[in-house]
Structures are given as C-alpha cells and as structure tokens.
Image: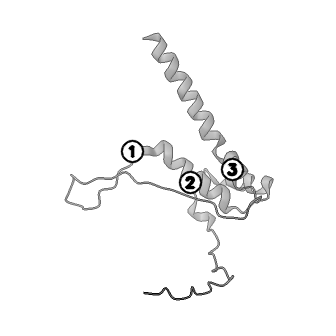
Amino acid sequence: MEWPNPENLGHELPAVPILDLNLLPVTLLPMVEDVADRMQVPIDFPAVASMATLSGPCCRRAQIQPKANDTSWVVPPNLQGGLVGPPGIMKTLAIAATTAPARALEERWRTENDMAKRER
C-alpha cells in the first residue's frame, strides 16, 4: 500500500479565546497582573503558571467523587498547564516569577521538616 501525499496544514493559527480574569482566584490576580506587566508577557503566562502551581500544595486535600452514591471511587483533581509561544518570549522567566512564592514556601517547609527530624 502506498501512502498518500501529506496535506498542507497551512500557516493560519486558530483564534484563541481571551483569558477571562474573573476565572482566577481574587487572591492571585494582583500577582498575575504584576508579573505580566513587569515582564511584558501575555497575562495568560502567569495566570496558567499560578493555577498549575497552586494545584500542587492542594494535592490530595481535595477529592472528586464522580458518582454520588459510590463513595469507593474518589480521585484527586490533577491540573496541568503549559505555555506556548516562540523562543525568547520569556515563558521560563514568567514561570519562575510566578512560582517563586511557592518555591519559597516549599523551602521553608523543607527546612522545618529537616529541623524536626534532627530533634527526634
């Protein structure tokens, strides 16, 4: 069997909906707006990074029970995010700026845990 010639996909990109900032938690909005403004990146970058980062500390504290009467089936919600853009548009720096508070908190928790282990 012979493969057909590949079709040209074209260069047009589909329209992307504008991020509705009302979907973000109110407590994240000042940081998201600040990072986007200071770094001159699309507001989507810090918004997506902050929501994905926030889902980490929530971990298994939240559970979803897909069936109302089946308590044996619960799953933790998993949230993943990604930033898409050409090289040099500061995706990595926007992620680093947005995740800095969570990384500082993680470091503090790690230090407290290490101290608690030494005291045992």
**Image position, residue 118 (x, y; %):** 48, 12
Q: Is residue 111 above or below residue 92?
A: above
Q: CA distance from mark 1 to mark 2?
A: 16 Å
Residue 64 lies left or right of residue 51; in this view the side is left
Mark sitting earlier along the chain (1/2): 2
Are there few (<14), some (14-19), or many (20+) residues within 10 Å of tag 2?
A: some
Q: Quadrant of the N terminus?
A: bottom left
**Image position, residue 119 (x, y; %):** 47, 11
Amino acid marked by disc 1: Arg
Amino acid marked by disc 3: Met
**Image position, residue 113 (x, y; %):** 49, 23
> Residue 3 bears which disc, if any?
none
Provide the residue designation for mark 1: 60
Residue appearing at x 61%, y 68% in the figure: 20
Residue appearing at x 57%, y 55% in the figure: 25
Q: Is residue 6 above or below residue 16?
A: below
Provide the residue designation for mark 3: 31
Are there few (<14), some (14-19), or many (20+) residues within 10 Å of tag 1?
A: few
Q: Are marks 3 and 1 in contact (CB under 8 Å)?
A: no
Residue appearing at x 43%, y 44% in the figure: 59
Q: Say what secondary structure mark 2 lies in.
A: helix
Q: CA distance from mark 3 to mark 1?
A: 25 Å
